[in-house]
Image: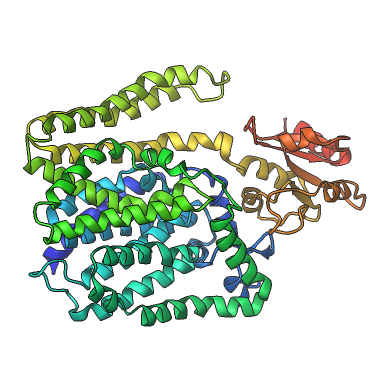
Amino acid sequence: MRGRLLPYVVLAAAAAAVLLPGIGSRDLWNPDEPRYAEVAREMLLEPRAIEHFLVPRLNGERYDHKPPLHFWNIALFGALRGGVDEVAARLPSLLTGIGSVLVVFALAGRLFGRKTAWLAAPIFVTSALVMWNARVGQIDMTLTFLELLAILFWARGRSWAPDDPARDPGGHIANLLFFACLGLATLAKGPVGLIVPLLAVVTWLAFERDGAGVADLRLGRGLLLWAAIVLAWFGPAVWLAGETYFDALILDQTVSRYAEATYHPRPWHYYFRTLPGTFAPWTLLAPVAIYAAFRRSRRDPASREARAVRFLLVWIASTFVFFSVSGGKRTVYLLALAAPLAMLTAYGVLAIRDGWPRYRAVFLASAAAVPLLFGVVVLAVPGAASDLPDGSIPEGTIASLQAVAAIPLVAGLIGVYLAARRRPDLLTACLATGLGLTMSVTAVRLLPLGDAFKSARVLSADLVQWAEPDEPYAIYPVPDAAFLFYTGRFAVDLHGGTLAHDQGDEEALRRYVARTDRPVWLLIERDNLERLSPPLDLVEVARDHDPEQGHVLLTTPEAAARVAATAGSGR
């Protein structure tokens, strides 16, 4: 047992070394991090009630954009830490990111063997989208972990070759666990948690003409288990919140979001442009590696490895097509492709090693492109920084950026040397080590610099310091969750509730500003303030450092005089 667990302990420690440093070193950044943290924070407000956990709230109003599993996780860590903070908001992503690395290792071992697994796990954890999403307070890493765990259970419950019996005879228990994970994935981010893994599995079984495999899934029983898990929350939530909650969560946030591109509309070819960046820098190695894997699988189509290659290709294709068909697209959705791409690339690298020198020239060319890419970054940083306003970045930042980019540059050069000596697998190890170190250093030293432009903490602190507790404040055009979180106060709603999230109501704004019972405070985006005509009868007292989409803090003249007096006495 100790020998079987040791690889997972080593991998967990390595993944934590990449993902953990700097987990709380920067503030929560829009759009998702502060919103999800604020929803979780409001779950823990007194008086606590079960309906607040079943039906999440934002700014005291019902929040029906996402199911609650991720918010529950943040609230749990917040309760353990004495309140929701940056660390509590990111711990669910961190832990599920580490868990995803372990699942990729186990799944690659089941499909191809341990040699491939030892390459697939580091490729996965050091791909761009994984390194980022495993350290931010978003839902997608939790969703990915549950989807991967579901695929792992299914893969362990079936035979992949005539001499490879399933671990669970008939796969019944494994298939039940498959659907149980899909139920939890649905609680994380809606029906996509069911559709994407099930589509990959069923499409591959149909492609293989494996009727017995479809029968072994026992879709009817499995979907009943999935529904029982989802309805355990959704039934009481709809009963408490009413039919409008069902309409908003299912029709608006699921059907309309997918079919009508209500949110994030993008052209059909959007993911063709964004996929290379999301799997970077492994995108440079993946094409030749995947081609080598495919060619190797053609030698013995009935072998375990050949069937596994076809499954990964179907998994990638079905997921890519599913998200491409939707009019609404976000780059983060491609996180679902990181695991199959990593496993297929890892197997392909080993195929290249074993087939050397057939792929030598093209592989070395693609491998050399990696350090070349980071070399360009090192050279381009000073020129790019010259376009920024003077004083916008701290002194020494340019040199730090160049030093950080030099880490994968050196690692890539060492890797190319080793690859040229017939060890492309060592190239992968070197590059993954360099990328992991780069991410750790970046998270600790460089990412916190973004707080100057992306954080609402300072402006929120000004508001809390200057506004009396009984003086209302509003945020226009929308109740920006970052200010809700960092002020710890609810804002006056100027846009008709959280459903009308995209526009403010100017009439409501002017009625609010016209209040005379007490001083009012207003956080308003710069561009919205400039468009108002006639201008508001308020005085600016502070603004953040974002020159484009930043906020300005306004208040009434008497409150502004109070602020000026406070500032004068402070000096």
Image quadrant in which you'd find residue 36? bottom right
Left or right: where does residue 541 sit relative to residue 536? left
Q: Position of residue 209 (x, y in %)?
A: 24, 68
Placement of 149 over or under 24, stated as above or below: below
| Residue sitting at the far right | 516
The residue positioned 65% from the left and 78% from the top of the image is 240
Q: How many marks?
A: 0
The residue positioned 32% from the left and 80% from the top of the image is 218
User: How did the renderer colour the structure?
Assistant: rainbow
Quarter the N terminus occupies:
bottom left
Q: Position of residue 14 (x, y in %)?
A: 25, 49
Image quadrant in which you'd find residue 351? top left
Q: Position of residue 513 (x, y in %)?
A: 86, 46
Is residue 9 something that shows in the picture?
A: no
Quarter the C terminus occupies:
top right
496 and 164: which is toward the camera: 164
485 and 352: which is toward the camera: 352
Placement of 89 over or under 568, stated as above or below: below
262 and 456: which is toward the camera: 262
Image quadrant in which you'd find residue 397? top left
Q: Position of residue 203 (x, y in %)?
A: 32, 63
Is residue 450 something that shows in the picture?
A: yes
Left or right: where does residue 285 sit relative to residue 26? left
The residue positioned 33% from the left and 38% from the top of the image is 280
Left or right: where does residue 161 sit relative to residue 224? left
Placement of 487 over or under 147, stated as above or below: above
395 and 138: which is toward the camera: 138
